[in-house]
Image: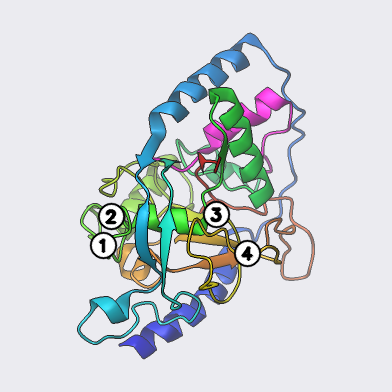
Amino acid sequence: MFSNRTLMAAMLPMTLILGTAACHADDGKAAATPPTPATADTAKAVDALKAKTRAQLVQVKGGTFLMGDFGPQHNDEKLPYSGTTDDDVLRKVTLDDYALQSHKVSYADFDVYTDAVGKPRVAQSTLDQPYRTLPDIAAGVSWTQAVAYCEWIGKQIGTPMTLPTEAQWEYAARAGGKLRVYATDTGKLEDGRNVSSIAQYDAFADMHGTRSRTSSLGAFPPNPLGLYDMVDHGYEWVADWYAPEYDPRQTRNPRGPASGTERVQRSSTDRAADQLSITSMTFTRNHRVPEPGPMTDGEGNVLEGNPNPNGGNGFRCATAPR
């Protein structure tokens, strides 16, 4: 069983690359979108976003947990669950208290930020419009853009914010570090009840006239801490640089390597439960360069679409360490 999982996990990056290329096969030119000047409407939108963000902050009581693929400590076979080698260095990690947003940041949220600071809105090309106009879906942005948003909204609400560390994300996904394989209400994947089924994806796409495979945020039950969509709706940036193995010496509020070339991502891409089972465990990891380059077609021509597509590079904010 685990050899098959290992093979499927190894094939996943190529599947994602091919899927992204297929979704953006047609070229499209970016619409001219000048920065939006601050207006009274912008101020109202900022106030609403501030209230929304405060309401979404889930207080997470710190503690000590066994971080990584705990399969050898949990199942009868004493074997890892994920079949990969970058999450199997088990270490006891202790975290201080922190708070984490219950939902991923949506495009609508991110638009409020860019309007308020006078930056162009993201994902405005004709390639992006089929998903960009969908209601309440996770924003796809670069790591740098995600950090900038978190720091900005933190200033607005008077609480320093940034991206969660990898350890904070995993601890919260596991409902306070418990041995939970999936970050759902039951700890299991129940297709169509606590994660989207393929039929539900297709119905959402048909309703909105798009080929994009996604659904609105918050449509399924949260995990026991009240955190939504930590299994689905796209990978999430976290603060850490990526390294193939954890440093076992980092045991209190670990922040990962001091430098690197890629940042860690958690959660998973948009998939139904049968495929999520090997890509979205609470300890599985993804990694990508923090500033993805432009998309290209099969001939190397640059496409004007968002290099952080829907289902790819989402995020949620956490309170910053003091």
Tell me where residue 54 sits by quadrant. top left
- Callout 4: SS: strand
Distance in Å between CA atoms under marks 3 and 4: 11 Å
Residue under label 4: 288
Tags 1 and 2 in contact by the CB under 8 Å rule? yes
- What stretch of residues is rendered in magenta? 101-125
Question: Which residue corresponds to mark 3?
Answer: 238
Left or right: 282, with 12 as reference point: left
Residue 156, percent from left and from top? 58, 24
Pointer 2 or 3: first along the chain: 2
Residue 316 located left or right of residue 29: left
Residue holding disc 2: 184
Which dot, 2 or 3, sits closer to the camera?
Answer: 3
Residue 189 tag number: 1
Vertical placement of residue 290 versus 11, above or below: above
Question: Residue at image x 72%, y 23%?
Answer: 36
Q: Nearer the viewer, residue 7 or 64?
A: 64
Q: Nearer the viewer, mark 3 or mark 4?
A: 3
Q: Amino acid at mark 3?
A: Val
Q: Earlier in the sequence, mark 3 or mark 1?
A: 1
| Residue drawn 50% across the image and 77% down it | 86
Image marks 4 and 2: residues in contact by CB distance under 8 Å:
no
Residue drawn where x is 58% and y is 38% of the image: 150
Amino acid at circle 2? Thr
Disc 1 marks a residue whose amino acid type is Leu
Q: Can residue 191 be seen in this snapshot?
A: yes
**Residue 290: horizontal and vertical position, in percent?**
68, 57
Q: If you read the primary sequence from the N terminus, does the residue marked by circle 4 or circle 2 appear first? A: 2
Amino acid tagged 4: Arg
Tell whether position 251 is magenta. Answer: no
Q: CA distance from mark 1 to mark 2?
A: 7 Å
